[in-house]
Every structure is written in structure tokens, then in C-alpha cells.
Image (cartoon, helix red, strand yellow):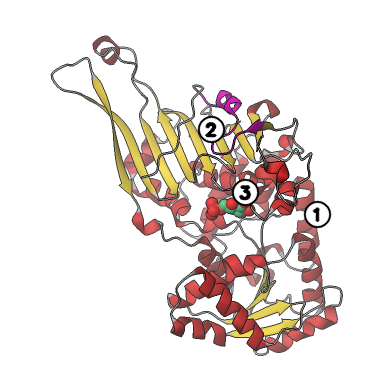
Amino acid sequence: MGDAQAGRGRADALVLFGITGDLAEKMVLPALYGLVSQGFELCRVIGVTRGDWSVERLRDHVRDAVTAHEKVEDKALDKLLALLRVARVDYTDASTFRSIAEQADGCAVLAHYLALPPNLYEPAARCLAEAGLSENARLVVEKPFGHDLASARDLQAGLTRYFPDEAIRRVDHYLGKESVENLLTFRAANTVIDTILHRHHVRSVQLTAAEDLDVADRGGFYDATGCLRDVVQNHLLQMLAYFVMDTPRSGSPEDVLAERTRALRAVRTVLPEDYVNGQYEGYRETEGVAPDSVTETYAALRLYVDTDRWSGVPFTLRAGKCLAARATEIAVEFDRPVAGYHHTVCAQKAAPNLMRLHFEPHAGVAFGLLARRGADETVVDELTTTLGFPHLNRSRPYEHVLEGAVTGDPTRFSTMEAITECWRVVSDLLPAPFPPLTYKPGTWGPPESVRLTRDDHWHTPRTP
Ligand code: BG6
């Protein structure tokens, strides 16, 4: 198999590094069960661990992880358990990786999934190559991919010593969200929507990804990461790319990836004056967090997208922990009525037409429109019509991530080029140019961030 196809063949073994870890327990194993229960033909799963695990112990672990998350059907769970093998490795000794080769006996294409701390990505890739397990294989790595542009490039250089770029898949689970992918479907299928999503009609766009929970038991990880690196550089910018990208010529991975990347290339690097960071009160008391931490748990920024379609339209993005609600939404504000009829007849200042695209906690779309109240022509009411997309609520992004790892389809992964652009966009904000402002848990973050919006006004997300 040549390099160009190296990443594409369907795997007949999924080699799952870190199978006994937290990420596998919470995300990967439930997703594998989900796939099997939906009839997906899953291949052999080789669990890789540093400990001395028997396959029976691993099966018990997988059973516990899956049943902790959902009600299971025994038949599907047994099917998953029967696919399990176990291999023990030491990341400082490539010869131990022979244990993987033994378990992969007879398999032609391997998918190595690294659910590992990032400092082990390179050692794992090197040992795989030295053990002869990098040919006809792909490498799937979790986020974060680097902690800034330079470290992402270093990581890329390290990994491509052992695996060609075409064989590397970089996880961003937002790319596995059906509600996010629907941004493209919704626009491409509805010309009425696609036509108005244009600088000729749009006054501003706000993207909110708010979480009401705190950082919980991830203090150590979060304090070294912060909101910008944790969700903005990756998830929010990828969502933005889906929103602003031109419609690809086809649904082929090449066309979709090319347009998504082109969109990211057009995003201007954010200026420090267009950035507001915040930290919720009480964050510094979290276990694993430095008592004098200046890590941001909230980030808001304004940016511009230099394409024919979006040039000049301000986009304001915000994300954070401990906010007033769990809600992910894109609010598109359209132009206000021009001087003339409306202003002469109607005494009210017209509210702007608004389209809200909802992602979390429920997928859907809402339109805010104005209509005359009745006999009195001087009064208009603001009316909202909401459509739910109930089929998109079941979406389990990790199932799509694992599906892509097994089938080789790169569409739902990030590329090095996209990651490079995303780091570039936030490069002047890392390290933070100023300390974060404090905000109260349960609010919408530092009130100062309102200055980044077009009209000094955030549209509070509403869930359908
Ligand atoms: C993860 C971040 O990548 O995304 C978490 O590390 C964050 O801090 C999560 O909570 C948000 O994902 P979702 O799918 O729950 O919106």
C-alpha cells in the first residue's frame, strides 16, 4: 500500500492504547459498544496496557465501563467482548511491541488509536515503527495536538518520522457531531438559508459554547490548558469553519476537507484587543489548580473571515465553564430595516431578525421575525418560530470518531493544515496578554466581554 492510501483501508484490528484509562472508559469504550449495538461490523480490538492484564480482566473492565454509561443489550456487549485481545507494552522498549504483532496476527490493516497523554504519542509511534507495525496502518491521536503552533509543528515532525501524514488522524470530537455537520447540510439543502447567509444580509454572528459545570476533577489538566486551548482553538473554530465554508463540490472527503481548511485559512489572526478572558470565582480552590493561577476558564473573542461571502462581518465567539447554562448556539443577526416605510409607520425600534442555530442541549433552529399586531399599523410583535432537529440529539460524536478510525474515512478528523490555521488564529493570545477578569459562577462571564459584540449585546442562548 502506498503512502497516499496508507490511511484509507478498512482496519481489521483496532489497536487501542490506553484502554484502561479515563478517556477510554468514558468515551471510547461506550462508543465501541454503541457501534456494535447498531450493527456496525467492528474488527478485532487489541487493548494495549502497561499493566499485566489478562483478557478476562480486560473484558470485565470493558463490561463495567460500558454498563456504567448505558443500559446494555447482552448480545451486543458479548459481541464486543468477544472481539477483545490484550497486549502489554513498555513505551521505552520497542521489543515489547511484539506483543501487539502477535495479537494482530493475520490482520492486514491496523488502526492504532492513542488514548494516551500527549507526551506518549511520539514514543508510541516510534515503538510501533520499530516493531514493524507502522506499515499498512494509521495512527489516531487525541486532542490537544500541541499546545501552540510551534509545539504542534514539532509533534507533527515527530510523528511523520514514523507514519506518513496521510495515515495520521487527529481527533476533534466536534467534527463527529451530527448537529455540527448539519450546518453544511442545512445550508446546502436550503437555498433560502444559504442565500441570506452572506455579508449583504448579515450584520453580525455570535457563537456561544457555554458549559454550566466547573472543571471538576480535571483541575491539573485544565490549569495547564485553559479555555482557549481546550475548546476554542479546536472545537469552536472547527464549528465556525462548518458555518462559513463554501459548499464543497461533492461530499468526498477531499472536497469537504479542502473547503473546511480554506475557510480556516481565511480567518484573521485575532488581535489582543479583541480578546477578553475570565476566571470564575473559586476556580483557584480546585484540586490540581495553582493557588495563584491565571488560567482562563472563559474566553471571548472577535474575529473576521476574509472571504467574498463574509468579509467585514464581525464574528464574536465565547466559551467557558461555570456559566449560566449549558448551551451551544450560533446567533445570526440580520440587517435592520432600511430607513423608509418601517420607520415612518412604526414607532418601535425594530428588533433585528435573528436566526439561532442550536446545537446543545437540543439541536434545532429558531427564527425571530416581526409581524403587525393587528388594526394598529404602528405596532409590530416579535415572533419566534422554532424547529427542533430531534434526530440529531442522539448524536454520539465518539461513535463517528471510532467509526472513522476503523473505516479510514478522514472526513471527521482534523488535518495538520487545519490545526496549523487554528493555532495561528489564536497565536497572539497565547500566552495570555493579560490576566483574566473574575466572574461569578452561574453568570455569563465577565460583563466586559460585551464590548466585543457589534451592538454591545450578547444574545442569550435559548434552547428549543
Ligand atoms: C472537551 C474539553 O474537548 O470538550 C472539555 O476537554 C469540554 O473541557 C468538552 O467540556 C465539551 O464537549 P461537548 O461535546 O460536551 O460540548
User: Disc 1, ligand 1: is the CB inside 8 Å?
Assistant: no
The magenta span reads: 438-454
The alpha-carbon separation of the residues under discs 1 and 3 comes to 18 Å
Q: Quadrant of residue 394?
A: bottom left
The question of residue 452 being in magenta is answered with yes
In the image, residue 81 lies at what x, y percent? 56, 84
Q: Quadrant of residue 110?
A: bottom right
Which SS class for mark 3? Answer: helix
In the image, residue 232 lies at what x, y percent? 62, 44
Residue at 60% x, 38% y is: 266
The residue carrying mark 2 is: 315
- Which label's residue is closer to the chain start, 1 or 2? 1
Position of residue 371 relative to residue 12, above or below, is: above
Of 173 and 218, nearer the camera is 218
Question: Of discs 1 and 3, which sits in the foreground?
Answer: 3
The alpha-carbon separation of the residues under discs 1 and 2 comes to 31 Å
Q: Which quarter of the rendering shows the C terminus?
A: top left
Label 1, residues with CA under 10 Å away: few <14, some 14-19, many ≥20: few
Relative horizontal placement of residue 324, taking residue 4 as reference (left or right): left
Q: Which quarter of the rendering shows the N terminus?
A: bottom right
The residue carrying mark 1 is: 154
Label 3, residues with CA under 10 Å away: few <14, some 14-19, many ≥20: many
Question: Of discs 1 and 2, which sits in the foreground?
Answer: 2
Position of residue 331 relative to residue 84, above or below, is: above
The residue carrying mark 3 is: 234
